[in-house]
Image (tube, grey):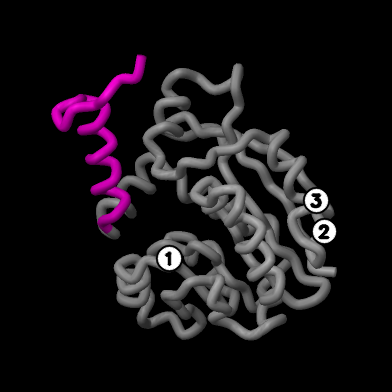
Amino acid sequence: MTEHLSSSSPTLLTMNLVTTILQHPLLWTVSQKIFGCDKQKHALYRGAFSGPCTMLDFGCSNGNTFEAFRDFTYYGLDIDPRLIADAQKKFAAENNARFVCADVLEHPFPDEFFDAILFAGTGHHLEDGLFPRIMDALGRMVKIGGSIHFFDVLRSPGEDSALLRLLIHLDQGKFHRTEARYRAMLPTISKTLRPVQMKTMRIRGTLMPQPQYFYAEMKRI
């Protein structure tokens, strides 16, 4: 039997509230500071890079990750014009930060333009059919020998608490994958990218429980 949610359904009202928060730059920033453990994620992401370089932050939202890469030549790319406008306003005084609103599949940057790319927290928004196309586009933008540092939250059946499952459910992403799924798909996702390391990790000591994170370094060959 299929259940149909009415406009007054508590579940639907909650989902509508979450959607409103995620679509408003200021509210999204506040929610990230409360629930998103920005400080810990910044350390996690920065730790994947060997040192300052010319980098792309794919799916940069309103630039909340820039703080971890202030000594880099930083480019942020997102398809949402409101979020990019907010980032451009917030970081207008930063000479090494550039924010671009564009579709990555339209090749907004030249081939082999970046030393490294951060692809973090966006995978679970991409359906399986789109994922290889995105990875291929990013692969062309990174220099030979450079890496795409891929991070995404995981579904961990049998390990995630009820609260954590609820938080994952409330996320707008519809394609949360398991560790096994990523380990199976990434080695064959591109002819020019090779995973040189894959691992999982969990951020602890936060106000809200955090899911496991999957990390893969995809090197351009």
Q: Which residue is mark 1?
A: 63
Callout 2–callout 3 Cβ contact below 8 Å:
yes
Q: Earlier in the sequence, mark 2 or mark 3?
A: 3
Residue at 58% across, 56% down: 130
Q: Which mark is residue 187?
A: 3
For the N terminus, the image quarter is top left
- What is the three-letter code of the residue carrying label 1? Gly
Residue at 54% across, 54% down: 42
Q: Residues within 10 Å of mark 3 (few under 14, many from 20)?
A: some
Of the pair 113 and 87, the residue shown nearer to us: 113
Identify whether 158 is placed above or below 42: above
Q: Which residue is mark 2?
A: 194
Which region is colored magenta?
Answer: 1-24
Residue at 33% across, 54% down: 29
Identify whether 107 is placed above or below 195: below
- What is the three-letter code of the residue carrying label 3? Pro
- The image shows a total of numbered marks equal to 3
- What is the three-letter code of the residue carrying label 2? Arg
Residue at 66% across, 73% down: 52
